[in-house]
Image (spheres, grey):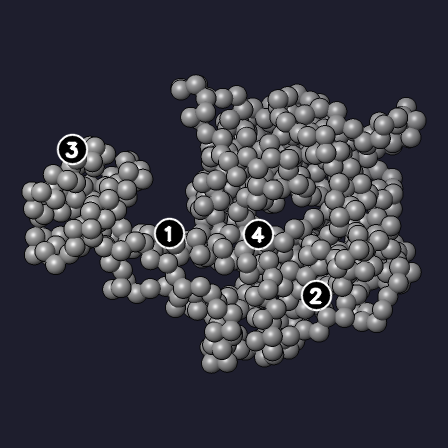
Amino acid sequence: MTAVTDSENVEGVVPPWDGFRQWVHCICVVTFDLEIGQAIEVVYPGDAYLSSVEKTNICYLAFPDSNSCCTGEGDMNFHFRVRRSTLKLQESQQIYSERVPNSIEVDPLYYYGFVHFRQRKDPKIPRGYYQKSVVLLTVLPLVQLFTEVVEIVVHSFFDMGEAAIEAACHHIDQWPAPTPGKILSLPLIGSVLHARIPCRSDIPHRSIYAESSILESVTTLHTIYEYEIYQNLMCAINHIQLLWEVILLGQPLVIMAPSPTGCSQIVHSLISLIWPLRYFNDYRPFFTIHDSEFKEYTSKAGPPPNVILGVTNPFFTKTLQHFPHILRVGDANTGNIADAGKTFRKAWDGRTLDTKPGLYSQYKSFLSRDKSLYKKLSKSSNQSTQILNAILCRHFLELTQSFMIPLERYLSSLMPLRKHISPFRAVPQARAFDTEEFLRTIADNGPSLTCGVQGDWAGLYRQFLSSANFDGWLRSRQNDVDRQLRSIHLDVLCSSEFSKDSLSSRHEVEIVDLVLKIRDRMVEMDPVTQAEKRLQLQAQLSKVLTSVDDELKSLLLSNCDLRETVE
């Protein structure tokens, strides 16, 4: 992954659309052409690069994939996720990823597309319908924010035309960098969005609201990752705990819904069930038969890929019937979201899938059904969806945290103690994660002691430890541990006693190595943000040089780099 920085440009010159590209890659208008089908009509800014494969994918993902969900007149909002042709990120996007919770980090492999599709009857058009979509493309997975942004842009676009998109791009270009933890004011075509991007230090699911404004044009968003999980998953609430396990383990799953709106909302809500753990497998909130990965994801030559696919086209009932888990929420008769509470465990065929809503899966849950959740939901059934959403969010947050606590506790045990960290040695490494050693800790320190849910926790952990979600979590946490150990080692270098007496028992080789360690740490430190630590190291270096004999001191100062560092 590479970052595009200002240093790559002429000093003092802000590159065109630099502020815009911190947030958005481009905004496209996609229309239906009778001769060539879907086509990109315009892209803003004009210099935004899209490969031919990206353009084709965007064209098809910008429109519904079946006729059943777009009869008559209407508007539709949904989002998709599609592979990128480059891994480049803006520097501000890399900083964003370092500061946000893992679940909303930027994945440089993918764009998110936020779509508003409109269909109107028009007798002047041969097909009888005017069809057009506005698509906002970004690498930032801020679903709530960009759904709102597209709505504001579209409201003006269908009145003013392309001038509205051009104006929106200029407004976004003036936005501050996407900085987590701050309340950001984002002016956009007569409105002002007040949004706060979560940061890693946030307490999970504690709402942090922007200051209220008397202006009606101000749209106040709270923590951007929040989504109406209950409303979106109500159709499958009977399977919610089983689906949590399927998502946690990263198993293949298909969502068959009557519209792109329904399937994209359900897919996004499902991966939110394991928050704050990030879902590391691929997932496509809306997937079409024209997607460039269609053959890859529907091939029956091997086991199904570990991906979540949201689909609407009836063709998928045959091409994806080999997937181990299929949630069908569409009613074949009405074309609406229907209760999918029934479970089909026996072998199924395309005919059954095509007509009957429900969960098609032979999966046997590791954990017992938690009746307390359904009691809470039942008692609150007359309450607002906001309260029901909060109950569901908190339940799965606590369940996921209970699941992760033993892993975090074990990872902490792999770190060396501070008293064993020496300035004369290299930055220490944590011990390797041992699966069997960890599983032996579950019997006495497992989640059943904290969350009350019973079942085969060891079996669930064993399966999880072979999943992409575990690999991704471990990589991320190992990076955190490495940073922590480097920080502790730096503190030890800054605070250790380097008097003549303490160094007298040390070999000359050890002292030379110590001096080079201090020099290297000083060179790699930021002279602005780490100025205080750098001064402490410089003082330590001077102390070492005054504590050694003249011959060794002369030898050390014969190194030009070291001499410049001391001076």
Count of marks placed on residues:
4
Image mark for residue 237: 2
Q: Nearer the viewer, residue 207 or 547?
A: 547
Amino acid at pointer 3: Glu
Q: Say above or below: 290 vs 317.
A: above
The first of marks 3 and 4 along the sequence is 4
- Label 3: few (<14), some (14–19) or many (≥20) C-alpha neighbours in 10 Å: few
Amino acid at pointer 4: Glu
Q: CA distance from mark 2 to mark 4?
A: 18 Å
Q: Which residue is mark 1?
A: 483
Helix or strand or loop: what does disc 3 sit on? Answer: loop
Q: Is residue 556 visible?
A: yes
The first of marks 3 and 2 along the sequence is 2
Report the quarter where the C terminus lies. Answer: top left
Q: Is residue 215 visible?
A: no
Residue 192 falls left or right of residue 491: right
Image mark for residue 154: none
Amino acid at pointer 2: Ile
In the image, what residue occupies the spot 60% across and 27% down? Answer: 168
- Camera-side mark, 4 or 1: 1
Residue 69 in which image quadrant: top right
Q: Say above or below: 51 vs 548.
A: above
- Camera-side mark, 1 or 2: 1
Q: Which residue is mark 4?
A: 226
Helix or strand or loop: what does disc 4 sit on? Answer: loop
